Image: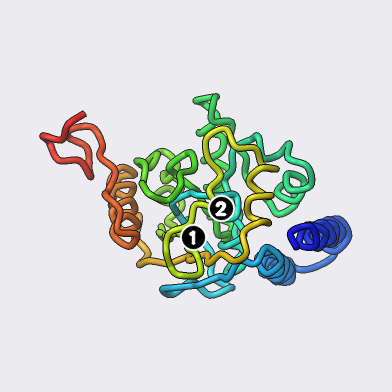
Amino acid sequence: MWLFRLARLLLHLLAGVMKAAFLFPLVTSARRIDLIRTWSLRLLAILKIKLDIKGSPPEISAGNILFVANHISWLDIYLFDAVRPVRFVSKAEVRGWPVIGWLAVKVGTIFIERARRHDTARANQAVHDALKAGDCVAVFPEGTTSDGSRLRPFHASLLQPAIDSGARLWPAAIRYLNQDSSPSVASAYIDEMSFADSLFRILKTPQLVAEITYLEPLPAQGRSRRELAALAENAIASWLNLAAPCRKPGKPACPPDAPQ
């Protein structure tokens, strides 16, 4: 069964490459968004992932929004794109992934080399320019993935473009569930797992539920990036029933006497 799903997936990836190569240069931005959304919905269907959308997502035409979300899997990207396609900030390694990396480039992904501290400034400028142009951008400010059982502190520096561009900061909470609504780790892309290992584990899972919840947007103006990071962390942690990540004493989201 999983071999059949793999064959369908490969054909779907090929269709995506053809559309990105030959259709994207010819169509309007609105049509491109529609193509990405339709392709992402089909991808989830092939992988037997049921998408459960909660909250009030933005209209397809909405722009100048910086989404922030917890990060569990490479699938997180396609959850967003199946609702309202956005541009992502992603680690530079993704650019080298076969097919997926090429498609990421074609849909306007902004890559960041996390090992180079000063690359954050360049990536933030690209995000700022995208937001000012009316795009929607999504970041995963934990900086890495988890199995969904915890939330790491958000890197506040990645939220600065929302303040500088006058964008709305829109938290979104992601979780993956089994058919009986219990938490699932089948989609978690963690530790030393390779992309191939992650993909095959998903293909061999009979059914997954991917839940994405759009929480209340946060006005960025008049707040520091650390305040925004703490507010977004608390909103996502509260919805997922997780403990809010603790920061150093004296910084938001961490009580002064918190153990270190």
Residue depicted at x 58% and y 68%:
84
Residue depicted at x 46% and y 52%:
165
189 with respect to 243 (left or right) = right
Q: Are marks 2 and 1 in contact (CB under 8 Å)?
A: yes
The residue nearer to you, when weighing 51 against 128, is 51
Q: Position of residue 113 (x, y in %)?
A: 59, 31
Determine whether 258 is above or below 201 in the image: above
Where does label 1 land, which residue? 176
Q: Position of residue 118 (x, y in %)?
A: 51, 26
For the residues labelled 2 and 1, the Cα–Cα distance comes to: 7 Å
Helix, strand or loop at mark 1: strand
Q: Pointer 1: residues within 10 angstroms few (<14), some, or many (20+)? A: many
Residue depicted at x 12% and y 36%:
256
The residue nearer to you, when weighing 143 against 186, is 186
Q: Name the image quarter holding the N terminus.
A: bottom right
Determine whether 203 is above or below 156 in the image: below
Where does label 2 land, which residue? 187
Please, what is the three-letter code of the amino acid marked with disc 2? Ser
Residue depicted at x 71% and y 71%:
38
